[in-house]
Structures are given as structure tokens and as C-alpha cells.
Amino acid sequence: MKPRFIPLVVVALALFALLAGYATQQGGSPAYASTTSSATRSDMVDFDGVRDARLGQTDTELRQGGAMTRPVNACGPVLTGVSAAHPVFADGQLVMLWANPPLTTPEGVGVGTSVADTRAAYPEATTMTAPAGSYQFDGLLVTNGDRAYLFMHDGQTVRKTVVGYTADVQRLFTYGVGNC
């Protein structure tokens, strides 16, 4: 190949990669499909988890991969580099994440989002009423197979966001959690 054609080949390959990426974004994927590739954004949590912390991973896998530490003075494990997400484990496996600002779902919903905007982003969300006599917020539950988002709100604004396995998220909403 002659040297003068090399820049042309480089430009053609770059254009092809750009168009392929655009076509993939415009494709017919479901609205709530796994967003593993986009979940690397530092401000996004999705049905799979956040950054290098994926639902279903064990605490050992997360620690060995450098995605989690267990500080002595902390209430529980802490994700490395994602201070806005707080992991919850059951039987040594990551089952839920509490997601705080600036973390949002791929649709832009998180703590601080209005209930109206949350319902617009997830029209199929199930309304959850807080248990009688509790101090808990009402919620909107969005499911995708065995995964769920739970947006707990005060009637106006999302106050708590949880991502996890549907059964664990529902159990959390029904029975609450401890102090830590």
C-alpha cells in the first residue's frame, strides 16, 4: 500500500466505526435491556449494577478485583471509586445497591427526580404503598426479569433509589432494613 493511501484508510475506518456505533444506538434493542457498555459512565447505575460492581458477584470477587474494600471503621463494605453506591449482600453475593446522587438510571432517574418525570420514564412502574404505621416512603417498582429499580418517594420527589434483584428489592420494601 502506498503511503498516500494510509490517511484515507484511517479516515474510512474511523467513519465506519462511528457509523457502526450510531447504528447500534438506533437499533431495536428493548428500552430496559442490559446496559453493560454504557454502565461504565461514572454517573450511571443500571439493572446490572454500577461500574465494576455487578449484581451476583461475590464479595470475594469484588475485593479481589479491586472494586470493593472493607474499611474497619465503616458500617459495611464500600465500593472503590463509587462512593454514591452502597452495596447490600445476601449469602456473600451482591443483591442490591442503594444509589445516591449523582448516580441515575440510563433514563436519567435517581434521587431528586420528580415523581412525574419518573412515571414518564417508566410508565409501566408498579405503585408500591408503604406498610401501614411505617416511616417508609411509598415507591415505584420497575422490573426487568429478575432485576428491579425501586424509587422511594415522598409523593413529589424520589428520595431513595435501589437497584437489585426483584425478590430482594420487594423484600426490602416490605420488611425494611436494619441500621447498617
Image: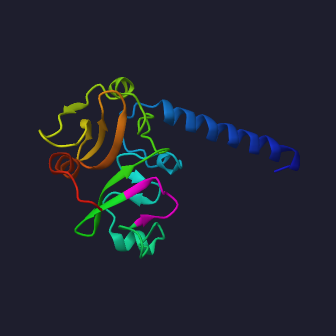
Tell me what residue is drawn at x 45 percent, y 31 percent. 27
Which residue corresponds to the image point at 41% horizontal and 39% vertical from the top-left? 111
Magenta highlight on residue 63? no
Q: Is residue 122 above or below residue 178?
A: above
* Residue 9 against residue 155 in the figure, above or below: below
Residue 151 makes an appearance in the image: yes
Q: Is residue 31 above or below residue 116?
A: below
Looking at the picture, how far across and down is residue 132, in whole percent? 11, 38
Q: Residue at x 63, y 37 (%)?
A: 18
Residue 14, image x and y in percent?
A: 69, 42
Identify the colour scheme used: rainbow
Where does the C terminus fall, quadrant-wise? Answer: bottom left
Q: Magenta residues?
A: 78-86
Q: Quadrant of residue 140?
A: top left
Label tally: 0
Find residue 143 and report its horizontal and vertical position in percent.
Answer: 25, 39
Q: Residue at x 46, y 66 (%)?
A: 67
Locate residue 26 relative to residue 93 in the image: left or right.
Answer: right
- What residue occupies the far left of the structure in this picture? 132
- Where residue 112 appears, x then y in whole percent? 43, 35
**Left or right of residue 6: residue 125:** left
Question: In the rendered view, does 100 fall on the left or right side of 165?
Answer: right
